[in-house]
């Protein structure tokens, strides 16, 4: 396999705090010998675990970049034992464009793993993380929220894994993040995801969905900033005690948690995030987008639980994820 062309401008193994870039050569109309410069900070202090922390895997999700920019600015080497690698804008071209996928090659980074060193720009970024950065890490935290098209309850989540011990370690780290909600997440399709690549390497993996709508709120930013430090404390990298608050435990026991639009149109929400529903309860109505006088289509809940996610824009396309209903396990 050819070498990846991305080069770091700072060391990964030298004590201290280093700000720099992951430089990806990218020849384009505006710059024949140009490069994509992905900001990165490495904070090192002696022996200890390594945490890899990433945001903007999708470019229109902002809680992660806020929390990681703050961490890169505030964290000092003397506060830690080990190493923290901080990449606030993992999919840098998408982040600068404010889009879910890269404007360069229209590839979704979180469906491009394990990537290719001789592929498109996004595939090269995926390959560098999969073959260079993830192997350095003991724990990986990848921030997500709903972007422009989804809105979520603020939760940190773990996945169901074949290894009971790895799953238990991931759940413990997710619980330490201590978002208002903690979820066992069942993905629609995990092929090509960063999550899948990280977990396949046996790493402890934490991910989040902390809101949505293509923006951040004061509350969601506070959750992200608090959570990232909690995870570092849990990992034994940062001193102190985990800042604990009550969290609601949620589960997604089956694919029927997902509800998809079977027609296009104008969405009338009937249930707000966090509200409980019974199976059969209408979650939303979809009104025709092109005429009056017709009945709307009602979308019923396929199971009882709490509304954990919803489609954000007022218009929906056929096949869009309209809602997610999760099962409440515990409160406290």
Image (cartoon, grey):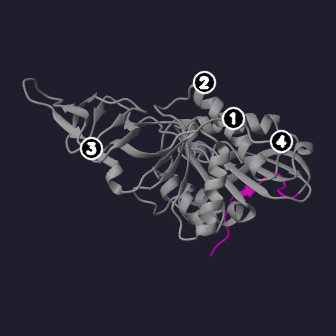
| Residue 88 in the image, given as x and y percentages of width and height | 67, 42
Residue to which mark 4 is pinned: 240
Is residue 131 in the magenta section?
no
The magenta segment: 1-13
| Residue 10 in the image, given as x and y percentages of width and height | 82, 51
The Cα atoms of the two marked residues, 2 and 4, are separated by 24 Å
The Cα atoms of the two marked residues, 4 and 3, are separated by 44 Å
Residue to which mark 3 is pinned: 279
Q: Nearer the viewer, mark 4 or mark 1?
A: 4
Q: Would you say 56 lies left or right of 18 here?
A: left
Of the image marks 3 and 1, the number of the one nearer the N terminus: 1
Crowdedness near tag 2: few (<14), some (14–19) or many (≥20) residues, C-alpha within 10 Å: few
Tell me the element at label 4.
loop
Q: Judge by depth and name the residue closer to the eye, 118 or 60.
A: 60
Q: Nearer the viewer, mark 4 or mark 3?
A: 3
Q: Judge by depth and name the residue closer to the eye, 10 or 151.
A: 151
Tell me the element at label 1.
helix
């Amino acid at each position: 396999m050819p070498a990846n062309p991305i080069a770091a401008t700072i060391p990964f193994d030298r004590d201290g705090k280093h700000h720099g870039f992951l430089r990806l050569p990218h020849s384009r109309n505006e710059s024949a010998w140009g490069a994509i410069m992905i900001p990165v900070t490495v904070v090192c202090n002696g022996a200890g675990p390594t945490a890899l922390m990433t945001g903007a895997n999708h470019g229109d999700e902002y809680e992660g970049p806020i929390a990681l920019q703050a961490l890169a600015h505030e964290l000092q080497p003397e506060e830690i034992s080990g190493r923290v690698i901080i990449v606030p804008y993992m999919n840098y071209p998408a982040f600068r464009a404010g889009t879910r996928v890269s404007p360069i090659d229209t590839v979704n980074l979180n469906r491009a793993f394990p990537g290719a060193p001789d592929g498109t720009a996004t595939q090269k970024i995926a390959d560098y993380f999969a073959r260079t950065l993830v192997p350095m890490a003991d724990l990986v935290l990848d921030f997500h929220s709903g972007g422009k098209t989804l809105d979520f309850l603020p939760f940190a989540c773990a996945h169901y894994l074949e290894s009971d011990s790895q799953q238990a370690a991931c759940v413990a780290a997710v619980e330490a993040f201590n978002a208002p909600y903690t979820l066992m997440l069942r993905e629609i399709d995990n092929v090509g995801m960063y999550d899948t690549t990280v977990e396949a390497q046996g790493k402890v993996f934490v991910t989040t969905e902390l809101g949505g709508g293509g923006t951040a709120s004061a509350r969601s930013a506070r959750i992200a900033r608090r959570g990232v430090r909690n995870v570092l404390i849990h990992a034994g990298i940062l001193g102190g005690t985990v800042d604990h608050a009550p969290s609601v435990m949620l589960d997604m026991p089956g694919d029927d948690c997902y509800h998809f639009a079977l027609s296009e149109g104008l969405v009338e929400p009937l249930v707000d995030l966090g509200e409980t529903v019974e199976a059969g309860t209408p979650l939303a109505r979809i009104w025709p987008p092109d005429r009056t006088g017709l009945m709307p289509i009602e979308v019923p809940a396929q199971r009882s639980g709490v509304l954990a996610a919803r489609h954000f824009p007022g218009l929906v396309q056929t096949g869009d994820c309209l809602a997610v209903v999760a099962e409440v396990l515990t409160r406290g």
